[in-house]
Structures are given as C-alpha cells and as structure tokens.
C-alpha cells in the first residue's frame, strides 16, 4: 500500500518539476534578454540608423522594415484567409475538395521556414522580378500566415451559435447577407485575435525574410525597396559577434513587440468572453 | 450522407465532428439558393465560388512551393542522380561531390535529441495542466506555455549561443556547439507544440473514466498512468509528430548553435551540420550546381515535413476507426 503512495508522490513531484521548469525557462529567457538589453534601449537607439562597420547607433531602418513587411503581409493575407475560412465553415460540404484544402493548409502550416524562404526567393524575387523587396517578403510571409489565420477564423465562425443564423434567415436574408451581417461580426474578436497571433509569428520570422527582402540596411519606402528586418539584424550581429549591446537591445525590442502582440490577443479574447457572460 | 459523415477528420479538428453531427440541417438549409430570385442566386453563387477560390489558395501555395523549389532543384537530381544525392556522404560542392546523407542523418539526430529532452518536459507540463494544477496555478503555467510558442527562433538561437554555449563549453571542454546544445534549444522550442496538443487530448477525455478510476481507489498517478494516458494515446502521438516536424524544420536557432561542420558527430559536443543549416550557411555564396543542390535539399526537407503531415492524417483515420 505504501509503495503506491510513494510512487504517486514521486510522480506528482515530477509533474510539478516539469511544469515549473517550463515556466522557469520562459522567465529566464525574458528576464535575461530584459536585463541585458534594457541598457541599450533609448529613444536614439530606436530612432537612428546603424553606423559604421560595427553597426553602432540605432536600429530604426530595421524596425521600419519589419513593421512595413508584416503590415503588408497582414493586408494581403487577411481577406484571402478569412474568405477561405468562411467557405470551409459555412459553405463547404464534407468531401474530397475540403479534405484536399485541409491537407494543403496543414502542409503549409508545417513548411520549414527555410523552404518558404527559398520558395519566396525562386518565385517572387527571381521569377516575378520583384527583387529583394518588401513586396516579395510580404507575399512569402502571407503564405506562412495563411493557415494560421484560416484555422483561427474557421474556429471562430464555428463557435458562433446556430440560432444567430436562424434569426437572420428568418428575416429573409440570403446566405451571404447572413454571413456578412451576423456571423462575421459575431466572430470578429476571435478573428482579430488570430490575425494578431499570425502577425506576431511573421514579426519573429527570419529565414523567410533573409531570402526575400535581403540583408542590406536600408530605410524602405516603396514596396519594391530592399531592407533588413530586426530578426535578420539580430542574427547577423549575434553570429558575427561584432556588437553585442545592439544585439541585446534588438532582441529585447523584438521580444517586447511579440509579447505585446500576444497580450493584446489574450486581452481581446478575455474581454470578449466576459461580454458574452 | 451517413457515409460522408464518417470521413476521417484533420488532426485536432474536433470542431469538424461537431459540424458533421449537425449535417442533416444542411439538407434543409434556410439559405437554400432555390428559394430566391435569379439575380440574387447568381450573385450568391458567384460569391460562393470566390470563397472556394480563396480556400484553394492554400492548395495553390503547396503546388507553387513544389513547382518553384522543385524546378530549381531538379537539375541536381538529374545530374548526380537522386539515389546518389540522397545516399552520398561527401558534401564538397566545390569539388563536385553532392552527397547529403550526412546532413539528413544529422537532422534526424537533432530531432531525436530534441524529443529525448523535450517530450518528458512537454508531457509532464500537459498532464500537470490538465490533471494536477489548481485553476490559479493553471492561470500562470498555461500562458507561459503559449508565450514560449511565440518567441522567435532567432531569440532562442541567440540565447543558446550566448547563455547555454559557455556552460556546455566549460562543462565538456569543447566549443560548446553541437548535438547537445542544439537538442536542448530545440527541446524547449517544441515544448509548447507538444504540451498544448497533449493537454487538449487529455482534457477532451470523458470525465467518467477519471471518476471510475478514482472510485476504484486509484491514486492520481495510477489514474494518469493506467487510464488517462492510454486513452489519450492518439492525441499525444499527434502532438509528438507535430513536435518532430517543428524540430526537423527549425532553421535559425539550429544554425546559430550547431557549429555547422559537415560530419557525423562522434560525441555530443562535436559540431554538426543539419539540412536547414546547410542551406542557410551556403546560400549566401553558392552558385551554379551548388545553389541547385541547396534547392534540392530544400525540396527533400519539404517532402519530409509533408510526410509528417500525411502520417498525422493516417493516424487520425486509424484513431477515428477505433472510436
């Protein structure tokens, strides 16, 4: 009888340790980057350009490139992904086509980022002659974001109660009117959450953008301009070991951006849940 | 209709099942197009086709990746021969040796390493969240797991390089780059994937089997080990396969801590080169056949990650049959 209790205590102890380690690892990561990076962070770090061979000074062009490209990717992917999800959730009848679409979306979600990078390079940079540019990078990133937004939107639409639709149909609305006027607004907070999470993922992406927007430090204005993302900047600084303070600062800023994306998404979900009671 | 409802579902697509269950509604769909005027009918039909086209963008994406990466890589298969490309162990592109077996083996090696460290951590966390944690503890651990998923791979790599590497270097008297360092970094990176999906699998079990086990006098651990884990088996295997896919395709973090030497390592501390790292290291200067070979590597990697997805499908079909 006693061994049973001892085993139980030991095993539960292991579960606590596992969960504790997970939290501890996250805490260490965030804490370390914060402590090391907070010294570099200043207004001039954010708003001036890197100078010289050691890339001293600020990182402004890389911030602009990252925000530019993820905004563009978000604008490209949102209509396509949301309408695709509308099809899957509202129109599609289970069958071969739907199975194919789901398999494709799952495959797209699991494409290694380096493969997506080379794909963007071969198709957008070379075949379509967009060159190393914001546009090439945004298009490649939108393929990365597509399955994420599709999945979260479809779940959001399916979570809308059936009776809301019946009310709309009862008033004589067509299917599209029902979807546009009642279903999509009701699902909106969760759809936005999905888009924010996918955008956060795009902000943190490195391998895709290296081969589609290039690595030269440049303040991008037109969509066909080249540039260097924050992640690429961090990668280059870290592997060449030339300027660690700037690397820490960039890592911290990147981390703050991504954590705030996650927190905003979390806040929207929670507020929405409370409103629905 | 009933035959259709039994079609296998995507892994984790539990919502599909709920939707399929209410399928008979669709036959008398209130939005049925026959009930409306011709103009509206045409408009609705056109919109429906537009949405279908959007959904097919995902399919087009997969085909385009195959086409463009595949076409760029094809000449190397034609020149060296697919079999020799895959089984050759010598990677000396400047001298015309294009054997990628070592790199593929290394990729699987770091994947296994990541699983060895990552799976216990992730499953422990998942079981803790679903069976042990009080709501207040859960409110801390669950967001932590989700945030871990959001951290960019380049930051994992940076952390591995700056913090983990010196530790391992001092301990093993080596560079600190290699199999162990990569495995540890990848292990942390796959924890959120495996933990989230396994936890869902555990939570979706009927509470009845838990209660029955406790009613027979089982301890918490006996219930977990003998009842819940076996019942959630398929979901957990799903989770691990997804984690494997993430580990083998991971690029930046691996490049930063692997050391990147194209050999099969003899020890845990010797630098090694994976498929993803080889592409990143060489893309910056490679040209001609060398560059083609990198595209060849990429398409092979794509096929590997796709076969993981296919394995998941197959598994959920088997799992669906058991229920």
Image (spheres, coloured by chain):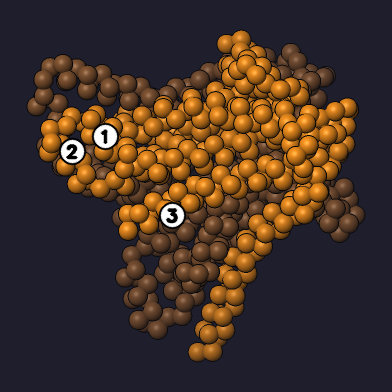
Chain colours: A orange, B brown
Please say if the residues under marks 1 and 2 sit with CB atoms less than 8 Å apart.
yes
In what quadrant of the picture does the N terminus of chain B appear?
top left
Q: Position of residue A238 (x, y in %)?
A: 80, 39
Q: Position of residue B241 (x, y in %)?
A: 52, 47
Disc number at residue A64?
none
Q: CA distance from mark 3 to mark 1?
A: 23 Å
Q: CA distance from mark 1 to mark 2?
A: 9 Å
**SS class of the residue under badge 1?**
helix
From the viewer's perspective, is A152 left or right of B187?
left
- Residue drawn at point x = 61 percent, y = 24 percent: A137
Q: Nearer the viewer, residue B145 or A221?
A: A221
Q: Position of residue B322 (x, y in %)?
A: 33, 54
For mark 2, does the 10 Å Cα neighbourhood hold few (<14), some (14 to 19), or many (20 or more) residues?
A: many
From the viewer's perspective, is B102 left or right of A178?
right
Earlier along the polypeptide chain: callout 1 or callout 2?
2
For mark 3, does the 10 Å Cα neighbourhood hold few (<14), some (14 to 19), or many (20 or more) residues?
A: few
Q: Is residue A140 above or below residue B267?
A: above
- Residue drawn at point x = 72 percent, y = 56 percent: A31
Output the chain of dot 3.
A
Earlier along the polypeptide chain: callout 2 or callout 3?
2
Q: Which residue is mark 1?
A: A181
Q: Nearer the viewer, residue A213 or B220?
A: A213
Q: Quadrant of residue A2?
A: bottom right
Q: Quadrant of residue A139?
A: top right
Disc number at residue A168?
2
Q: Which residue is mark 3?
A: A270
For mark 1, does the 10 Å Cα neighbourhood hold few (<14), some (14 to 19), or many (20 or more) residues?
A: few
Earlier along the polypeptide chain: callout 3 or callout 1?
1
């Amino acid at each position: 009888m006693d061994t049973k209790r001892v085993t139980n205590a030991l095993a539960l102890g292991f579960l606590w340790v596992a969960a504790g380690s997970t939290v501890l690892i996250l805490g260490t990561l965030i804490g370390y980057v914060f402590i090391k990076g907070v010294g570099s962070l200043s207004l001039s770090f954010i708003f001036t350009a890197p100078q010289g061979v050691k890339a001293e000074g600020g990182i402004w062009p890389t911030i602009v490139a990252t925000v530019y490209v993820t905004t563009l990717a978000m604008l490209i992917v949102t209509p396509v992904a949301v309408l695709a999800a509308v099809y899957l959730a509202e129109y599609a009848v289970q069958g071969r086509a739907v199975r194919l679409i789901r398999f494709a979306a799952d495959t797209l979600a699991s494409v290694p980022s380096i493969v997506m990078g080379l794909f963007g390079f071969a198709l957008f940079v070379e075949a379509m002659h967009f060159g190393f540019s914001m546009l090439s990078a945004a298009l490649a990133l939108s393929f990365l974001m597509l399955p994420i937004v599709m999945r979260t939107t479809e779940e959001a639409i399916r979570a809308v109660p059936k009776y809301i639709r019946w009310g709309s149909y009862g008033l004589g609305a067509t299917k599209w009117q029902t979807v546009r006027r009642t279903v999509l607004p009701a699902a909106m907070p969760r759809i936005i959450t999905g888009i924010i999470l996918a955008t956060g993922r795009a902000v943190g992406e490195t391998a895709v953008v290296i081969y589609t927007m290039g690595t030269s430090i440049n303040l991008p204005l037109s969509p066909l301009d080249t540039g260097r993302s924050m992640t690429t900047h961090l990668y280059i600084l870290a592997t060449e070991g030339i300027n660690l303070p700037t690397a820490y600062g960039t890592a911290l800023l990147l981390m703050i951006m991504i954590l705030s994306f996650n927190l905003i998404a979390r806040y929207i979900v929670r507020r929405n849940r409370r409103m629905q009671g | 209709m009933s035959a259709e409802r039994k079609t296998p579902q995507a892994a984790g697509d539990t919502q599909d099942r709920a939707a399929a269950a209410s399928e008979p509604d669709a036959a008398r769909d209130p939005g049925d197009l026959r009930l409306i005027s011709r103009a509206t009918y045409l408009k609705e039909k056109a919109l429906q086709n537009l949405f279908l086209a959007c959904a097919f963008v995902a399919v087009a994406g997969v085909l385009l990746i195959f086409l463009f990466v595949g076409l760029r890589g094809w000449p190397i298969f034609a020149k060296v021969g697919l079999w020799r490309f895959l089984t050759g162990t010598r990677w000396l592109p400047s001298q015309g040796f294009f054997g990628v077996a070592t790199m593929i083996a290394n990729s699987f090696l770091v994947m296994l390493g990541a699983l060895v460290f990552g799976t216990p951590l992730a499953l422990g966390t998942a079981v803790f969240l679903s069976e042990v944690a009080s709501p207040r503890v859960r409110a801390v651990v669950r967001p932590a797991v989700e945030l871990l998923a959001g951290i960019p791979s380049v930051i994992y790599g940076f952390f591995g390089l700056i913090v983990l590497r010196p530790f391992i270097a001092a301990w093993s008297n080596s560079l600190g780059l290699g199999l162990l360092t990569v495995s540890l970094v990848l292990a942390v990176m796959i924890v959120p994937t495996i933990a989230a999906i396994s936890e869902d699998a555990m939570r979706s079990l009927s509470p009845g089997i838990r209660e029955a086990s406790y009613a027979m006098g089982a301890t918490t651990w006996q219930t977990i080990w003998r009842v819940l884990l076996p019942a959630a088996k398929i979901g957990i295997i799903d989770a691990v396969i997804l984690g494997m896919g993430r580990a083998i395709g991971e690029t930046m973090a691996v490049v930063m801590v692997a050391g990147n030497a194209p050999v099969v390592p003899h020890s845990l501390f010797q630098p090694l080169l994976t498929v993803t790292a080889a592409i990143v290291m060489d893309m910056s200067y490679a040209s001609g056949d060398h560059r083609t070979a990198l595209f060849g590597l990429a398409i092979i990697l794509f096929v590997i990650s796709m076969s993981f997805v296919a394995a998941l499908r197959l598994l959920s079909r088997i799992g669906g049959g058991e229920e």
